[in-house]
Image: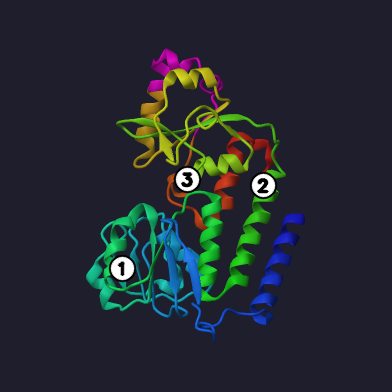
Amino acid sequence: MLKKIIILCILITAVFLSGCGPQQVDGNKDGSPYAVITDDLGRTVRLAEKPQRVIVLSSSLMNFADAVDGNLVGRVAVKSADAVVPERYKAVPEVGPVYNVSMEAVLDLNPDLVIASKSQHGELVALFEQNDIPVIVLSSKTYADVKRNMEIFGKVYGKADMAKAHMDLMDAEISAIKARVPQEGKKIVIIHATPSQVSVEMPNSIAGSCAELLGFTNVAAAGEIKTDAAQVPYSMERLAEADPDVIFITTMGRKEKIEKIMKETFENSPAWSVLSAVRAGRVYTLPENLFLLNPGLHYPQSVSYMAKLVYPESGL
């Protein structure tokens, strides 16, 4: 009941502020830019005026635009069954799939801003700049990334109050989840498995960020490894020494195939069978849509899913 009251209060406040609060205007009388944004490539992007023709090149980033009622003149084509195009953008022209954006289609739409994904479109930045198209490149892994993205979309569309309301709502939902589970610092490891290799995920991955929010101790990050990578190699010896309480598994592709491979590995390898998590059956596969495809504004759902696996008695 308390959670519902908190959420209702935030939404009421957002409606009031968006209608009565000061709004960002198109540029400033002194000639200063409408907005100055530092993106996740460390680039400073100056927008002289409020963008009117925005293209978004990532399905997860589209949801941020939708959250602040932003209009688009172009968008990435969405093929994945796990990605949903917001209703307001279904008729918006497509500029190609996320990994094969058509520069010709982008230029035909004459955008005054492109918002792109760091992991997918870094190589396109020079092309946009050569065509005098401002581009903001964003990362979407950790919860901090998600909140920062929301703030940036609020600036782009002049809806800072609406963006803040969404951030406050997510904070309240995650706080409510954390209040339902013990803060006992369980030791966990997040294994990213493919048919050809196994690595571990660090705190700057989606699953790693969720674990950190829940107060879990990621054993891969507790050692000497210092890296900005989301996934790193990890030795079996180090894992056995850390002996995590819980093992999470993330995987791209066919979940059943990976689970079969991991089950056979656990059963046939003495190195795995000695781990406390394996012996106790505390090995959980995390769904791709919540832990590899960025959940964006649904981050609380990812946190809740992980918490429920470890603490089913929480009632989440």
Residue 180 rendering spot, x and y as whole percentages: 71, 43
Task: Reply above or below: 302 against 98.
Answer: above
- Quadrant of the image occupied by residue 172: bottom right
Mark 3: secondary structure = helix
Task: Give the answer, above or below, for where 14 lies relative to 181.
Answer: below
- Amino acid type at circle 2 is Ile
Residue at the disc numbered 2: 177
Span colored in magenta: 265-284
CB of mark 1 within 8 Å of CB of mark 3? no
| N-terminal label among 2 and 3 | 2
In the picture of the structure, the residue carrying the numbered disc 1 is 129
Numbered tag placed on residue 291 in the rendering:
3
Q: Residue at x 47, y 16 (%)?
A: 273
Residue 281, given in percent of the width and then of the height, sits at: 54, 24
Q: Which structural element holds mark 2?
A: helix
Residue 285 visible in rendering: yes
Q: Residues within 10 Å of mark 1 (few under 14, many from 20)?
A: few
